[in-house]
Amino acid sequence: MKRIYIFTGKGGVGKSSVAAAHAVKSAGEGRKTLLVSTDMAHNLGDIFERKMGKTVEKNVMPHLDLYEIDPEYVMENDFPAVVEYLGNLFADLGEPDLQSMGMIPGMEELFSLLKIADIYKREDYERIIVDCAPTGETLSLLKFPELLSWYMEKFFPIGKVGVRVLAPISKAAFKVEMPNKYAMNEIERMYLKLAELQELLKDRDITSVRIVTIPEKMVLEETKRNYMYLNLYNFNVDGVYINRILPKEIDNPFFTQWLVLQRQYIALLKECFGALPIYEIPWYDEELKGEAAIRRIVEDVLEGEEVFRAKNITERERFRQTETGYELEVFLPNGEKEKIDLYQASADIVIKTDNFKRNIPLPNVLRRYRVSKAKYESGKLRIWFEKGCEEDEQGDAS
């Protein structure tokens, strides 16, 4: 079966090198492999010492292709009518410089994901390895399909009717041009692609998310939050890579305290992520540039077939019937109880923590039930539903 491996982590922890090492190992096993970068600060070309273009670079080595995605190029080639409409819209609003969908937050990341889904569907790569942007951008990228799908499900049917009714008068009355039928058809096509993309990313037999980190306090805390957010959106995290570990035998007093701190943070990482496979990558004495340098990671860390084996380790959200109603359980490791909030909005449960929010659609059987209580403990948020409860607008996890 074809697989997708997404590598994420804080900026500067070495995601690209770790992703590249997996790609080299995969190609060395004779599997047709594509290494993709969705980070706008692409560096695959630097790592492999190749000049990259806007399309797939073929046969960088046997069985390995590279691709640095240019989302604006993807938008203009795959959805030209939408781009043309938005260009006209921005011009009508007196913003002639905003001639690109890239100016809308999240759209560049979205089109990168749509391109990966297209490649997965149409090409015969056995493994697609994705070098993502730093943590915050990656989380925005991964949650965007679900968020946009939710809005489009709510508004798209009305919007399509509204376009037919308002299009003839919109230019004169509102000084804004409504999308034409070609743009609407492309928006509808994009919506269908979003549904496919969401299904692809949440399929644990297809997609794995792997976190790259280093043994430093600030990075450790961000890694814990990253893991919690990824579980909030129900992604399958099945590996943690601790990069840049100093050798224990280093003979230099300058590094003595650093070694002590690294040991402490490595122990904390293993404590936090004990259920996941953890790979320890040494700090190399050379820049990881070129195939030979990348192979050092393969030989030192990625030996064996376990590296690419699909693992379903983290728990999925689940509904179950109780004596008085139903219960929803959401796996939310490393959460802070006082920062978790939830409320029931129409046919959805909305869970919010820090700046991240997720709408979980309720099954039809629960449409007449209301939240009776919620509790967060041992890394799990449990929400109970009963009939006849007062329809509280908002609540938090106790």
Image (cartoon, helix red, strand yellow):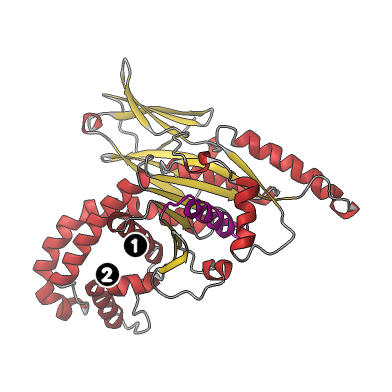
Quadrant assignment, res 392: top left
SS class, disc 1: helix
Q: Residues within 10 Å of mark 2 (few under 14, many from 20)?
A: some
Report x, y in % for residue 177. 19, 77
Rendered view: 373 above or below 151: above
State which quarter of the image contains the N terminus: top left
Asked if marks 1 and 2 touch (Cβ < 8 Å), the reply is yes
**N-term-proximal mark, 1 vs 2:** 2
Q: Which numbered marker is on residue 153?
A: none
Say what secondary structure mark 2 lies in: helix
Question: Which residue of the protein is positioned furthest toward the right in this rendering?
Answer: 253
The segment highlighted magenta reads 10-31
**Observer-nearest of 291 and 88:** 291
Q: What is the three-letter code of the residue carrying label 1?
A: Lys
Residue 142 drawn at (x, y percent): 41, 52
Task: Report whether residue 353 is seen.
Answer: no
Q: Quadrant of residue 174?
A: bottom left
Position of residue 194 measured from the top left corner of the image (x, y, whole percent): 28, 55
Please say whether residue 269 is one of the residues in the magenta stretch. Answer: no
Mark 1 → mark 2, Cα distance in angstroms: 9 Å
Mark 2 sits on what residue?
78
Q: Where does label 1 land, which residue?
A: 115
Left/right placement of residue 323 relative to residue 236 reads left
Is residue 117 or residue 23 the one in the foreground? 23
User: Which secondary structure is most common in the magenta stretch?
Assistant: helix
Q: Is 16 contained in the magenta span?
A: yes
Q: Is residue 87 left or right of residue 270?
A: left
**Residue 256 image point, x, y percent:** 86, 48
Q: Residue at the spot x=33%, y=50% of the render?
A: 146
The amino acid pointed to by label 2 is Asp
